[in-house]
Image: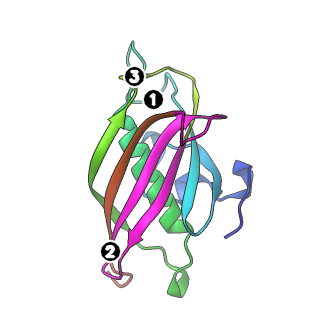
Amino acid sequence: MAESGSGSDWPPMASLVPHQGPMCLLDHVVNADERHIVAAVISSSNSLFADERGIPVQVALEWMAQASAAWSTLQPREGGTPRQGMLLGARRFEANIDHLALDQPLEVRVSVDTVADSGLGTFEGVLYRAGNTCENDWLAKATLSVLQTPTDA
């Protein structure tokens, strides 16, 4: 899978995640390869989760889950059919803030930790402001556990 810096080089996010309309929360893929994906998101005042203080930082867990789904869809599969999956849980969620400022460009980086033949996988997710680094300038981070359904299910 080639890397790119432009969202236009990747399929639309709505074609990569199982959510449609206002529940498709990510804007576009920034880059991706066989071990990670970076997705852009704007913490918009139009978000279903926005309130007078901004967007609760816990929404980052759903952004990370949707980024892991997009990564999975982009992976080549035998027969070309992406596997469906579900978020089983999150561990070690940490956040440096309670709410995300509105209309702020953010990025979500999700890195593959493990993916077993059974479909059970773990991903390391990090949310940070676009233009910063995920290692030192993170806003939230967590380890996600996901289960992908068998391709014949």
- Dot 1 surroundings within 10 Å: few (below 14), some, or many (20 or more)? some
Q: Is residue 92 left or right of residue 109?
A: left
Tell which circle, 1 or 3, labels the residue nearer the N-terminal end.
1
**Is residue 34 depicted above or below 8 in this figure?**
below
Q: Which residue: 45% across, 58% down?
A: 68
Q: Which residues are magenta?
A: 108-137
Q: Which residue: 33% across, 75% down?
A: 119
> Identity of the amino acid at label 2?
Thr
* Residue reaching furthest to the top: 52
Tell me residue 126's x, y (percent).
Answer: 47, 44
Checking the image for residue 99, the label placed there is 3
> Identity of the amino acid at label 1?
Ser
Which of labels 2 and 1 is toward the front?
A: 2
Q: Is residue 67 left or right of residue 98?
A: right
The answer to whether residue 45 is magenta is no
The front one of 34 and 13 is 34
> Identity of the amino acid at label 3?
His
User: Disc 1 to disc 3, how far (Cα)?
Assistant: 13 Å
Tell me residue 42's x, y (percent).
Answer: 56, 32
Look at the image and tell me whether residue 87 can be seen: yes
Main secondary-structure element of the magenta-colored stretch: strand
Tell me residue 40's x, y (percent).
Answer: 59, 42
- Dot 2 surroundings within 10 Å: few (below 14), some, or many (20 or more)? some
The front one of 67 and 27 is 67
Which of labels 1 and 3 is toward the front?
A: 3
Checking the image for residue 149, the label placed there is 2
Reading the image, the residue beneath label 1 is 47
Which element is circle 3 on? Answer: strand
User: Disc 2 to disc 3, how far (Cα)?
Assistant: 33 Å
